[in-house]
Image (tube, helix red, strand yellow):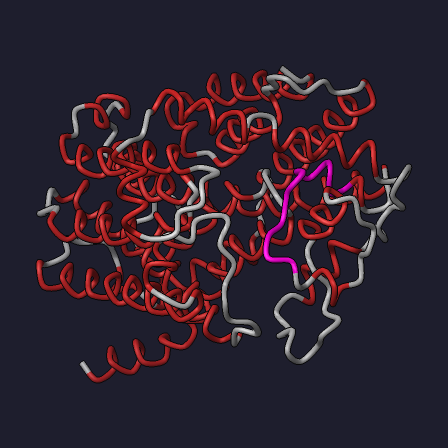
């Protein structure tokens, strides 16, 4: 264990003592679990005293800031969401009819079809798109930004639909047909990404919906989950996907026939050893590399390097070739032994790495950057936590879904890189609010006519 990992365990225990089983719906609890998994437990890597202390300092700043901010009233933000609740009062939670569930499933199916179509075009064939995983690079360059925005927005919407179907199923005991079909379709779309987390996150959405209903109905959470036979189908899909993705890790799969053969011949125990050896202390190793490299053999990046990447990210690169890029690709350049941080050069990188808030903060001008970005991410996580704790048990779908998006965004805050955490977490929230703003006049107009 790292020193910061021990502190994270202590903080976890404090949350459990204070909230009991409700702790599992507290973003601070979940963020600490994620931190322990990626930065608390070490297997083979040896951290220097400097690395240990800087990691501890970053985590203390992040956690204490997030906790303090989550306890503030934030009247404007809470008031804004309450106003949306009032405007969409017809969206108060009630049982969904079978036809309504079917329409929601069709939206999920539309996303899956568009996702496979987009990636088939991007990678050159369906076989290549379905077996792209980690190693294959797209054949198309200069992909229009609006296409990726559409696909990502539909994915976010599909995740919300999965939650709504699961919540409705758990609370009102409705038929689980369209829930299972939606989950299976999303799992098929997520599998070619090659990440086990992409599959597991779908199950987390379903489990979270069941936990919220259990807490709302004042039932034992553990009992509700383990005795819920409806969870067997999604859990089985996740388990099988977990085995399959472990078996193909670090293997180049050229087509669906090779994929089928690799999975059929998989040795799970050996695959898991290979996976762990490839992943293992990966984030801690990259964090330690940042501490040992930046400021010594590699010059520090400017203090605002990450901040500029976050602020200017919405601008299409086709308009601004020198648009700042995230820290992840800069770290990839360093890992390959280079020191060329020109934005246009780094923009051609097809993959990136992460070193957590502490590693990325340190690369941004040393101790000053570590303190600054730990504080800023603590502010961000604290606001998300406040919204989740206020609205996660809401009886209106609008505020409940905003809380869910904030909860999912909080899970991304720890691992990094920071730009990816913000774009994948904050953008879906903003997209959902924009959709609500567009729909609000039509909802009012319809209500007045009736």
Tally of numbered discs: 0
Q: Is residue 212 visible?
A: no
Q: Is residue 20 visible?
A: yes
Q: Position of residue 34 (x, y in %)?
A: 52, 31
Q: Position of residue 208 (x, y in %)?
A: 33, 38
- In the rendered structure, the answer to whether residue 295 lies left or right of residue 124 reads right
Q: Position of residue 322 (x, y in %)?
A: 75, 71
Q: Locate the N terminus by quadrant.
A: top right
Q: Locate the C terminus by quadrant.
A: bottom left
Res 362 quadrant in image: top right
Viewer-proximal residue among 248 and 206: 248
360 magenta-colored: yes
Viewer-proximal residue among 225 and 119: 119
Viewer-proximal residue among 44 and 203: 44
Q: Residue at x 53, y 44 (%)?
A: 412
Q: Position of residue 116 (x, y in %)?
A: 33, 63
- In the rendered structure, the answer to whether residue 1 lies left or right of residue 257 reads right
- In the rendered structure, the answer to whether residue 302 lies left or right of residue 106 reads right
Viewer-proximal residue among 215 and 202: 202
Q: Residue at x 58, y 49 (%)?
A: 421
220 magenta-colored: no
Q: Residue at x 62, y 33 (%)?
A: 283
Res 81 quadrant in image: bottom left
Q: Is residue 36 above or below residue 439?
A: above
Q: Residue at x 48, y 32 (%)?
A: 30
Res 370 quadrant in image: top right
Q: Is residue 18 above or below residue 251?
A: above
* Magenta highlight range: 349-361
- In the rendered structure, the answer to whether residue 37 lies left or right of residue 315 reads left
């Amino acid at each position: 264990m790292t020193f910061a990992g021990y502190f994270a365990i202590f903080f976890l225990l404090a949350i459990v003592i204070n909230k009991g089983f409700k702790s599992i719906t507290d973003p601070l609890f979940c963020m600490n679990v994620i931190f322990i998994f990626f930065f608390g437990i070490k297997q083979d890597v040896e951290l220097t005293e400097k690395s240990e202390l800087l990691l501890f300092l970053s985590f203390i700043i992040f956690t204490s800031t997030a906790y303090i901010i989550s306890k503030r009233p934030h009247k404007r933000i809470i008031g804004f969401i309450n106003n949306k609740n009032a405007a969409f009062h017809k969206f108060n939670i009630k049982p969904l009819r079978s036809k309504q569930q079917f329409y929601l499933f069709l939206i999920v199916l539309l996303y899956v079809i568009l996702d496979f179509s987009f990636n088939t075009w991007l990678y050159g064939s369906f076989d290549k798109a379905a077996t792209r995983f980690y190693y294959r690079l797209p054949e198309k360059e200069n992909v229009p930004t609006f296409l990726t925005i559409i696909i990502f927005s539909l994915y976010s919407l599909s995740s919300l639909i999965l939650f709504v179907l699961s919540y409705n199923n758990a609370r009102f005991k409705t038929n689980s047909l369209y829930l299972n079909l939606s989950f299976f379709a999303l799992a098929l779309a997520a599998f070619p990404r090659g990440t086990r987390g992409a599959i597991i996150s779908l199950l987390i959405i379903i489990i979270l919906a069941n936990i919220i209903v259990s807490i709302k109905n004042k039932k034992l959470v553990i009992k509700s989950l383990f005795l819920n036979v409806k969870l067997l189908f999604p859990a089985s899909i996740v388990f099988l996907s977990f085995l399959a993705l472990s078996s193909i890790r670090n293997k180049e799969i050229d087509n669906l026939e090779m994929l089928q053969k690799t999975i059929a011949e998989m040795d799970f125990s050996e695959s898991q050893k290979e996976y762990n050896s490839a992943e293992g202390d990966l984030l801690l190793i990259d964090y330690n590399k940042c501490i040992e490299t930046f400021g010594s053999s590699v010059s520090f990046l400017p203090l605002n390097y990450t901040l500029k990447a976050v602020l200017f990210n919405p601008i299409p690169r086709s308009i601004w070739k020198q648009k700042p890029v995230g820290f992840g690709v800069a770290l990839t350049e360093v890992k390959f032994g280079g020191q060329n941080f020109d934005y246009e050069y780094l923009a051609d990188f097809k993959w990136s790495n992460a070193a957590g808030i502490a590693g990325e903060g340190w690369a941004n001008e040393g101790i000053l950057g570590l303190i600054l970005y730990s504080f800023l991410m603590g502010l961000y996580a604290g606001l998300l936590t406040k919204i989740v704790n206020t609205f996660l048990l809401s009886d209106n779908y609008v505020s409940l879904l905003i809380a869910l998006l904030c909860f999912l965004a909080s899970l991304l805050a720890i691992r990094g890189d920071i730009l990816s955490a913000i774009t994948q977490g904050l953008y879906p929230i903003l997209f959902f609010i924009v959709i609500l703003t567009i729909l609000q006049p039509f909802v009012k107009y319809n209500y007045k006519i009736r």
